[in-house]
Image (cartoon, grey):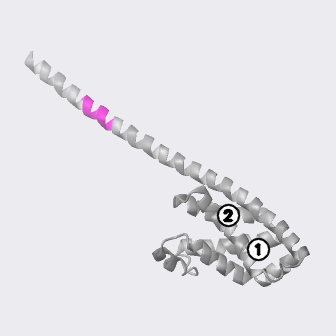
Amino acid sequence: MRILSYLKDKENIIIEKWFDVMIESYPADARKFFNAKEKQFSNPIGYTLSKEIEIIFKELIIINNPKLLENSLESIIKIKAVQDFSASQAVEFLFQLKQIIRQELKDVLKEKEILTELLEFESRIDNTILIAFDLYMKSREILYDIKANEVKRRNFKMIERLNKKYEEIDTSSKTQDSRDE
């Protein structure tokens, strides 16, 4: 596919634009912070987003390691799931990649063959979107379970404390009754 060579040639530009578009979904203060994407420990989200979209893009081109693609997707999706993005907002970055590619390759897309190849490549992105959606749902399910278990734990602790208080009251009441007799 000739389109793959065009994508490889424009790889750095596409990835940079993709990162920029991706962080636009965050508030202005966060965007400034995320742009320091080289700092893994002081900016783990920006670093992770930057690193993982590069892996995703390369894997979409070479289709060498589907598990690597899925792991990179999962890293991004977990961030978005924890940050309470909706499912559509969480996977939107993959739709944005399609738009960026079309913009960057607009000059060569006039050729029918390249346009056909683009549609084939976009079907790879579509399949990746489906995987990302499943990963998002799985992540949200895990978060829900964690929250539900925390509520159960709190309720159990509260019931334990109430039972303990009741026992103390009951014991003191019995002691008082025995003194009264």
| Image coordinates for residue 22, horizontal then vertical, percent | 60, 72
Which percent across, then down, holds residue 96? 67, 70
Position above or below: 31 against 137: below
Front position in the image: 169 or 10: 10
Q: Quadrant of residue 102?
A: bottom right
Can residue 47 be seen? yes
Q: Position of residue 141 (x, y in %)?
A: 58, 48
Residue at horizontal 74 percent and vertical 61 percent from the top? 128
Q: Amino acid at mark 2?
A: Leu
> What residue would you read off at disc 2?
73
The question of residue 86 being in magenta is answered with: no
Image coords of residue 15 (percent x, y)? 69, 78
User: Which of these two is toward me, 111 or 119?
Assistant: 111
Name the image quarter holding the N terminus: bottom right
Q: Which mark is residue 21?
A: none
166 part of magenta stretch? yes
Q: Residue at x 15, y 24 (%)?
A: 175
Provide the residue span drawn in magenta. 160-167
In the rendered structure, which amino acid carries the disc numbered 1?
Lys
Q: Residue at x 72, y 61 (%)?
A: 70
Task: Report the residue at 76% width, 74% height from top.
Answer: 58
The quarter holding residue 172 reads: top left
Pick whichever, 171 or 79, lies toward us: 79
Q: Secondary structure at mark 1?
A: helix
Is residue 1 visible in this depiction of the protein? no
Q: Residue furthest top?
A: 181
For this rendering, which residue is in front, 112 or 81?
112
Q: Which mark is residue 58?
A: 1
